[in-house]
Amino acid sequence: MVSPQAVEKLTQLGVFPKTVGVNAEIFERCSTLETITQEAINLGWSCGSGQFVYFHLGEMLKDEKYKSSFLKKAKEELGSSGISSDHILEYYQSGADPGLVFSIRHGEYIAPVRKAFYERANQFSLNQIREWLGYR
């Protein structure tokens, strides 16, 4: 059963308001981006897993207290990725498709470094959302 607290938190975010219950179920069941991708396919959504995560995260980061805590954790967790701390912060504040924006702005990082960073950053983001919802 989906946590009523998670549904309430997602309702307050206002992301995909018609599917809040489904979104809560997805966050509860899916601990990886791959499983979210499969859920999106099964539901016939055109939204990918990264977009699904970042639409929610973008709303969460509007809370300045949460944003400060999140960005501090992100720098600590992703600091060994080969991406500078300033660029990690920029990544999370660039919008709903941070990978695309980051690739355009920071082509100086070789593709394998960027790809590995995106994978770690996206998983970190999903983990933080699941924790915020009480699923971790």
Image (spheres, rainbow, N blue to C red):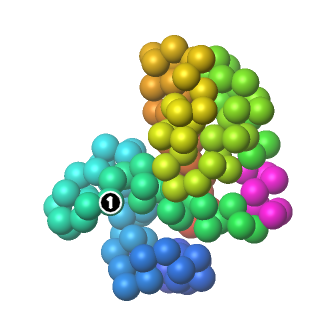
Q: Specify whether 111 is left or right of 78.
A: left
Q: 3 and 69: which one is in front? A: 69
Label 1: few (<14), some or many (≥20) within 10 Å?
few
Residue shown at the point (70%, 41%) measured from the top left: 90
| Magenta part of the chain | 64-70
Q: 24 and 120: which one is in front? A: 120
The spot of residue 123 in percent (x, y) is 49, 41
**Residue 5, can we see it?**
no
Residue 5 is a magenta residue = no
Residue marked by disc 1: 47
Residue shown at the point (20%, 67%) measured from the top left: 43
The spot of residue 15 in percent (x, y) is 49, 74
| Residue 129, placed above or below residue 103 | below
Number of marks = 1
**Residue farthest to the front, as pictured:** 104
Q: 79 and 92: which one is in front? A: 92
| Residue 129, placed above or below residue 81 | below
The spot of residue 95 in percent (x, y) is 58, 54
| Residue 112, placed above or below residue 65 | above
User: Could you say whether the residue bearing mark 1 is in a helix, strand or loop?
Assistant: loop
Q: Specify whether 33 is left or right of 95.
A: left
Circle 1: residue type: Cys
* Quarter occupied by the N terminus: bottom left
Q: Quadrant of residue 60?
A: bottom right
* Quarter occupied by the C terminus: bottom right
| Residue 134, placed above or below residue 84 | below
Residue shown at the point (57%, 36%) measured from the top left: 102
The spot of residue 46 in percent (x, y) is 26, 61
Residue shown at the point (59%, 82%) measured from the top left: 12
**Residue 32, can we see it?**
yes
- Magenta stretch, main secondary structure, is helix
